[in-house]
Amino acid sequence: MKTVAIIDYGMGNLHSVSKAVEHVAPDIRVLVTDNADLIRDADRVILPGVGAIRDCMAEIRRLGIDNLVREVSTDRPLLGICVGMQALMSRSEENGWVDCIDLFQSEVRFFGDNLIENGERLKVPHMGWNEVHQTMDHPLWHDIPDGDRFYFVHSYYAEADGNPDIAGRTHYGVDLAAAVARDNIFAVQFHPEKSARAGLQLLKNFTNWTGKC
């Protein structure tokens, strides 16, 4: 039986992600674990995340997950979700600059306390449904129309402009990377497990993806 390992470092939305994957792929075994051997043995790996990146990175480093993620991403599909995506970037300005795993050379920025568009102040965190415009042809976008809507909850974002790995973009006061991809890695700022049909389709596509598109 194929397996998907969801990395448990104490900071992720583990239950909802695991239930969503089980729903779209009932023939796949889903493991929620921090066991390095089980993660290494899995066919696919998910790095979730919620909360503050400083706390997330502290636990990721304490458990050796940063090196483990670098290792498994070389030979199998890896999906980062929300703060799990941000953790794959080079660094984040949350709580002062925090070094991240650095698999993507992009910085994570704060929306700011005065995010203005069309003369109106936007609420931070960005919370709600936004259109995602696909910027590359990728297997994880299969059967998802360009411009479909996904659910976001975040105060920080990966930059879109000049990002060579951007796979999808959205706009909330600024253009931001909704998804990035390279080789075996696909990562999203939104929550696919909370994004109804489009999000479930993306998770289904991940369970069928063999990597390195």
Image (cartoon, rainbow, N blue to C red):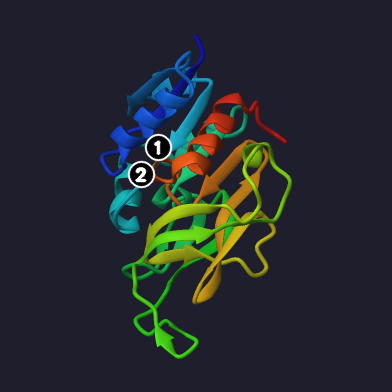
Q: Is residue 196 above or below residue 121?
A: above
Q: Mark yes or no: residue 189 visible.
A: no
Q: Which mark is residue 65?
A: 1
- Please state which of residues 186 and 89 is positioned toward the viewer in this rendering: 186
Return the residue at label 2.
61
- Residue at the spot 65% in from the left edge and 38% down from the top edge: 143
58 horizontally vs 117: left or right: left
Residue 43 relative to residue 22: left or right = right
Determine contact: label 1, label 2, CB under 8 Å.
yes
What separation in Å lies between label 1 and label 2 (alpha carbons)?
6 Å
What secondary structure is found at the residue carrying circle 2?
helix
Tag 2: residue type? Arg
Image location of residue 127, percent across then percent down: 36, 62
Q: Look at the numbered disc 1 and give the secondary structure of its residue.
A: helix
Residue that protrudes farthest toward the bottom in the picture: 119
User: In the figure, residue 129 lies in which quadrant?
Assistant: bottom left
In front here: 131 or 140?
131
In percent of width and height, residue 125 lies at 34, 67
Asked which quadrant contains residue 81, the reply is top left
Residue 56 location in percent, x, y? Answer: 32, 50
User: Can I make out residue 184 in this image?
Assistant: yes
Res 210 → quadrant: top right
Q: What crowding class fits label 2: few (fewer than 14 Cα within 10 Å), some (14-19), or many (20 or more)?
A: some
Up the image or down, 63 lies above or below 112; here it is above
Amino acid found under the numbered disc labelled 1: Ile
